[in-house]
Image (cartoon, grey):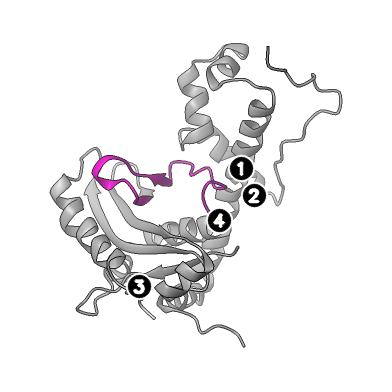
Amino acid sequence: MAWGVTFYRSSTGKVPAQEFLATSPPNVRRKLLVILEVVRAAPPPAFSGGGMWEAMHGTMNGYYEVRATRPGRRNYRLYCILDNGTKTELAKRGFDEPHIVVINGLVKANASLFSDGDYRRHVRKLGEHYRATLPRPVAA
Amino acid sequence: MPKKPNAYERYLAEQMADPEFRAEFERERREIETIDAIVNALDGLRDERGLTKAELARQIGKNPASVRRLLTASGNPELRTVVAMANALDADITIVRRSHGRARRTAA
């Protein structure tokens, strides 16, 4: 089955992932979009990931990270949820196909780490809102 | 009736309207897909033979970590360079099983 890609939309109408992409350098934006399109064409587990698409663990279990790493520079990350289910489940969520839902993006200096607080505030809080809402809050 | 594009699809289309962006996008996409196809093909053959990554590494005299990296992550700059060169030269790289390849290992 074909997969779609969509941006999460917050309760205030903001689209954090699109805002993140718009403020990212053009080559980073391009790389992140390329990875999303490659994953869309070969959804998990078909795409090996190549270090550019990684399932997260621990408190971020259930999220996927898209990575554009620029050696010696800043590292740009997009955080996604895979929303899949039966045809009926997908219809309740407002989808007619499974979706890669792009929640938000974060940027960090090389060799630094995001704190769990960063993940909670900028990703999980939004992801929880997304998962708790029917139909899903996405940017139409 | 064609589906109305969503915000993501419209955003991507806007970016792709720039010919320079599109050309680089397609080049990067070809590279990622080629590397993915090579990695998947090698890993599939390894699996068919019933070899673990560590066993395959021992067969070729490499550290198991280097084989794991090649098959699971981006730690293969040489492969990326080879694929980029092939792309620049309008060539494809594929893994083709030898017709006289060794028989598949069976479970003991």
Q: Chain of mark 3?
A: A
Q: Is residue B51 above or below residue A12?
A: above
Residue underneath mark 1? B83
Residue sitting at 49 percent across and 59 percent down? A34
Residue underneath mark 2? B87
Membership of A59 in magenta stretch:
yes
B47 displayed left or right of A125: right
Q: Which callout, 2 or 4, points at the residue further toward the start of the chain?
A: 4
Q: Amino acid at mark 2?
A: Asn
Q: Nearer the viewer, mark 4 or mark 1?
A: 4
- Magenta residues, start to end: A42-66
Residue sitting at 24 percent across and 44 percent down? A59
Residue underneath mark 4? B29
Q: Amino acid at mark 3?
A: Arg
A86 displayed left or right of B93: left
A42 displayed left or right of B94: left
Q: Nearer the viewer, mark 3 or mark 2?
A: 3
Q: Which callout, 4 or 1, points at the residue further toward the start of the chain?
A: 4
Quadrant placement of the N terminus of chain A: bottom right
Membership of B42 in magenta stretch:
no
Q: Are marks 2 and 4 in contact (CB under 8 Å)?
A: no
